[in-house]
Amino acid sequence: MNLTARVVVNRLAQQCAYKRIVTFSTKPAEHAVPAQDEPKNVEVPPAAPTQTPAVPPTTPRKPIIPANYRFVYPEFLPDPKVEWRNSIREKLERLDMLERRKQIDLPEFYVGSVLAVTSSDPHAAGKTSRFVGICINRDRCGLRARFVLRNVIDHQGMEVVYELYDPTIQKVEVLRLEKRLDDSLFYLRDALPEYSTFDENMEAEPLEEGAPVPVNDIKVVLRPRPWLERWERQNLRGVANIDQYLKDKHRLSSARVQKPWEKYDMMKHYRSTIAEEEQTEIFAEVHTELHTLELQRKRNKRKRTFLKPKHLA
Amino acid sequence: MIRTAISQLMGLRPSGGLLTQVRDKGHLSRPRLRNPQWFLRKEVTNRGDLVTAENKHFINDLVHEGFGAPALIKGVQTYEQNLIKTRDLATPPQTWTPQIRRCGVIARKIGQYPLWLKNGERIRTTLLQIVDNHVIKYIPPEEYVPKPLPGQRDSAANHKRGVLIVGSESTNPVQLTKEYSGIFKDSGVVPKKNLARFFVSPEAALVPGTPLNASHFRVGDFVDVRGKTVDHGFQGVVKRHGFKGMPASHGVTKTHRRAGNIGGGGEKGRVWPGTKMPGHMGNRWRVIRGLRIWRINSKYNVMWVQGSAVAGPTNGLVYIYDTILPLRKNQEAPPFPTSYEDSSEDVWYEKVHNFKDESIIYEKE
Amino acid sequence: MNQADVTKLMSQLRIAVRPNKRNLKNPDGPEGRLLKLRKTVTALMKHERIELFYNRADEARGYAELLISNAIRYGDRHKATMELADYWLLEKQLVHKLFKVLVPRYENHNLSYTRMYKAPRDYPGTYYRQSVLELRGNPYPTLDTDHSQNRNLLHNVLLDEARKEFRRQKLSDLVKSSQ
């Protein structure tokens, strides 16, 4: 009897302790508490050989959500700044994004992929304009998500910022699906023009189904200074000849602003990411619809790749 | 001043002879950060940590007995109350005229995101969620006698508007004081976290217990939104008034973010009232008027209003009124005195592009 | 409005996390701040219960939690985790303790790995708030107040009686309605 009483008291103490904690979580409190008792849905990363059993015995089934969803659909994850978060707003935003995705095929692409975007333009001749270019940056989340395309047309560098969910966009085609060595390619602005020149009538280069997205390890050649940014400070991997233009003073100043300790600042990373449990929750909500859209896209692609042989003579 | 301080310390009420007038610098312009001492206390300080688990359960059971089990209604945590008033319970139907002032609602600013118009234009919208609003009390104009402000004559005789007290966001009454819970006693509503009063025409009076939803407004109407701006604390002129400051170099010393000159000499040799200077920034009530409602989602009681300038932080409280701007006022009758229908649909203003529609294509001339 | 960083995947912490970091006053800047916190985390892993200023404890708590959670998640054969442990634990024998003692202890744990208490401020002393930070499951006697005798308090006795009365009333109502 004494033992049970103590157990009850302990549990009470724990409950009290949890009620008192002021969380900055956006989840309502009644969701937050049972979430701790739920078995963790541990996704085992491929590069993590562990001594412990890979799947804990408490896990009922394998997660159905593909591990690469956070790379394919990064805009479905909300801004990690807690002061700006609200679960209902995020939910409404995701619903709107899904509605838009049902109208238009927004394919998987990454920074470094070559895209062609057809959009309505009141000032263009045929009221539509098509722009081909390399995606040099992706940013913002939710309905604000946008990407930058770059191309060199008539010896003039052109960049267009597109909003992914803008209803004036009619079609997004991925001409070449690949990644680059860096997360953003703004240095192409200071590179030789041939690195950002793409043919407007470029044919789509199909990738084998199920094959991993290739990483293009091309190293671009920069023009001499002056540059738009101090590229030497950004630890770029996709640049070939940066050392050629650096003097000692540049090397010294770039060494001075490096922050090697940030690699170990786990809380900084934690505050800039969405925790895995929360990601699973978000993607579980949108997974079925995204999956059906993906299947539909695959079917369409097969239809398109099969061309009827032309009737000769 | 010292004498007042001493009397406060001793817990004495300053009598007429003891009270000395305080004239501090910035004493009046500083935003008040806490309620006065005589204000009704809301939350109890005793958290009941010493109550055993079974008894805590028992107390909660009692609360649920009275107000229903906890439930998530329209995305807000509240209790299952059987309080939904219908039209027949309300006062006999009144006709609406443009002079009539309706009740407002309490909402939370839950964020902002873009919408697109049908002509392809991108607009910024703020999402306001109406959080579990119920009418608590109506005070008719003849009964509403506010305490006259010092220096003002009592104008109780010419009050034309009554007062509706509206509460939002149900809470556990165990955490509230007896006096505060007493406000809700006659309405039959669960005690609420937030209260607001709205001055309404007597025709727009509502029965206590009436829920207020997003359907109180119509898509396309204009509203005024009142909120408390983000508190930035004491700030310099560069942040507070957008002054340019002075150059970083070229011989400038110690005056990089300073205001510079604040006035000339001569006959008017003084600092003029209203000169922009450093001081407390934010934490003040501000009203943004004439915002169009672009879209209403009745399932979550959310409305999308124009712009991103609504005062206050995300998840902050705001109050929504029908606009008083003469050219944007309601021309046709809005739901009056409020809408009693409960729907769960998503209504878009005719000019806004619905995401369910196809992409926008401009027609060729 | 920016995107969440997707290159890293972290488990949700079971503690309340402040939206912003504290700078913890240090002449060496952010690097010095981390050194300060490394000392605290090392001490926590070593002694399992430490008493220190509240702000510093609160900052160090997150790092300790994440260190343990990473160790559980990736194990000791993961290079990045090992580097993290090497950086955060200044005394290297504690790396063994982390992987061989703490990981088994917290493997099937549903609560946070650490616990924090507010401690009294000594008067007249420094103004800073004091706290006690400890690892759960440590060998020391508990710091929780003993609530086992609460049921003998007057209001609990009265509430007990009221509860019984309430239940009896409900039961009789039920019987009446069924008849």
Image (tube, rainbow, N blue to C red):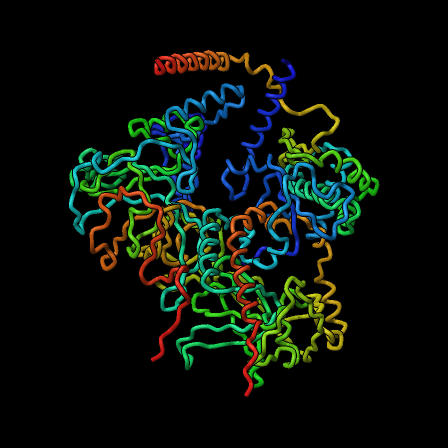
Residue at the farthest front position:
A313
Which residue lies most toward the right here?
Answer: C93
Query: Does residue B7 show up?
Result: no
Q: Find residue A224 and report its horizontal and vertical position in percent.
A: 69, 80
Q: Nearer the viewer, residue A174 or A94?
A: A174
Q: Nearer the viewer, residue A286 or C128?
A: A286
* Left or right placement of residue A202 versus residue C72 in this view: left
| Depicted B16 relative to depicted C85: above or below | above
Q: Quadrant of residue B142?
A: top left
How far across and how far down the image is residue B122, in percent? 41, 65
The residue at the point 58 percent across, 79 percent down is A202
User: Which residue is more in the foreground, B102 or B86?
Assistant: B86
Q: Give the left or right position of residue B347, taking residue C154 as reference.
A: left
Residue A2 location, x and y as percent?
64, 14
Residue at 65%, 29% in the rendered image: C122
Quadrant for the N terminus of chain B in the image: top left
Q: Residue at x 48, y 73 (%)?
A: A118
